[in-house]
Image (spheres, rainbow, N blue to C red):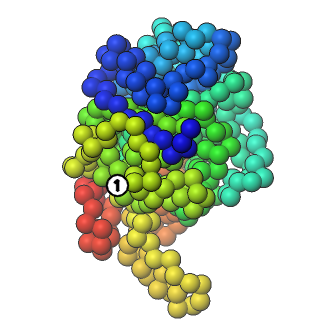
Amino acid sequence: MNPNLVSIVPCADYAPETCVSALTAVLEPLGGLDWVKPGMKIVIKANLVAGAKPDRAVTTHPALLAALTRLLKARGASVTIGDSPGNLFNASVLNRVYAVSGLAQAEAAGAVLNRDFSEKDAYAPDAVQAKRFTYTGWLNSCDAIINFCKLKSHGMMSLSAAAKNMFGTIPGTMKPEYHYRFPNPNDFADMIVDLDEYWKPVLHLCDAVTAMEGNGPTQGTPKHVGCLMASKNPHCLDVLAATVIGLKPMEVPTIAAANRRGLAPETVDGLTVSGDWKPFLQTDFELIRNRNSILFVGGNNVFSRTVRGVMNACLQSKPKVKTRACIGCGKCRDICPAHTIAIANKKAVIDRKNCIKCFCCQKFCPVGAMRVHRSPVAKLLTHGRSKQS
Ligand code: SF4
Ligand code: SF4
């Protein structure tokens, strides 16, 4: 099979019958589910980054998870669905996430919701960045992993789709540590690609029926795109997903990292796409255009380092508190891996000199008060459509 094959089909809504027929259609060019044999244990790694009602477009929609469960169960497989949200990886957090995110729908279709909260250590000698890492142990007890992501904008990586979804294999409260270990976004992206390579899900699916634009991946705005995408290659799926929402694929650090390893083409022209993607092309999708695409790299002598420091200071996006919206809950302070946020007068205050621009604070602010602020110079250079500043 062509390794760059990506399939895309219309999926107008989350009605159960629409989901089953769209899933069947999107999988068909990839050989369907013929690889699923009776008795197989299949894990669906969903995007359950936070407990949020399905119509907020934060999580993989439960109707699609239920439809996929039905298709897999019809072939005699057992199905476990799970993820590690950005919080404690334990029963009380996950039970709440499952309940709020509507996972009862998938449970009713025959899926088991993961309740193995063990953590394990991995050694990946061929990895570029993540040679040793800790992961959520539930992923061990299966014959195959299906990665079912949600199409969203993302503060740090610009795009949250197939590749980024596998960061959810790191236990929740450890995720900020990984941001601290890999403060350079290109290294962070390489770490994500390492995780993708380590787990090698047999299949990647993307819920782009209702995507999230703007302040993603948790506080953005739902946006109807109306399609499903599938591929055996997460980076190729992401090239198409990025193109659909109006991002240049190589602006996405994970795609650029995959491209450096020969795992993804630079543009959609390097893909074999089954289905017509142009009807889904978004011309007004509110992006968070990543600053790294315009970062000044240069050499390593004193002059280059000085110019690089000045240029990057001018170009880099920064987290910024929308003071009126901040409720002083302290979640950003608690999650900040650089410990650079304090709460003063019931408002978050960032000490910028230690900020590593990981945007964990933006990702987990429950009211969307933490925003990605792009410098005027960066806006001028990229003519981005971001309204995030
Ligand atoms: S998480 Fe959001 S609302 Fe809570 S203190 Fe931080 S900025 Fe304010
Ligand atoms: S202030 Fe926000 S972006 Fe900066 S290090 Fe802390 S969590 Fe990351």
Locate residue 92, reporting x and y percent.
56, 23
The answer to whether 231 appears left or right of 285 in the picture is: right
* Count of marks overlaid on the render: 1
Type of residue at label 1? Answer: Leu
Closest to the observer, 330 or 302? 302
Residue 75 location, quadrant: top right
- Report the residue that reaches farthest toward the left: 284
Which residue is at the front of the view, 360 or 35? Answer: 35
Q: Secondary structure at mark 1?
A: loop
Q: Quadrant of the C terminus?
A: bottom left
Q: Which quadrant does the N terminus fall into?
A: top right
Q: Residue 271 appears at what percent x and percent y?
A: 44, 48
Q: Whole-percent x and y of residue 379?
A: 28, 68
From the top left corner, tell me how far across and down residue 105 is, in percent: 43, 13
Q: Quadrant of residue 233?
A: top right
Q: Can you identify the residue that label 1 sits on?
A: 247
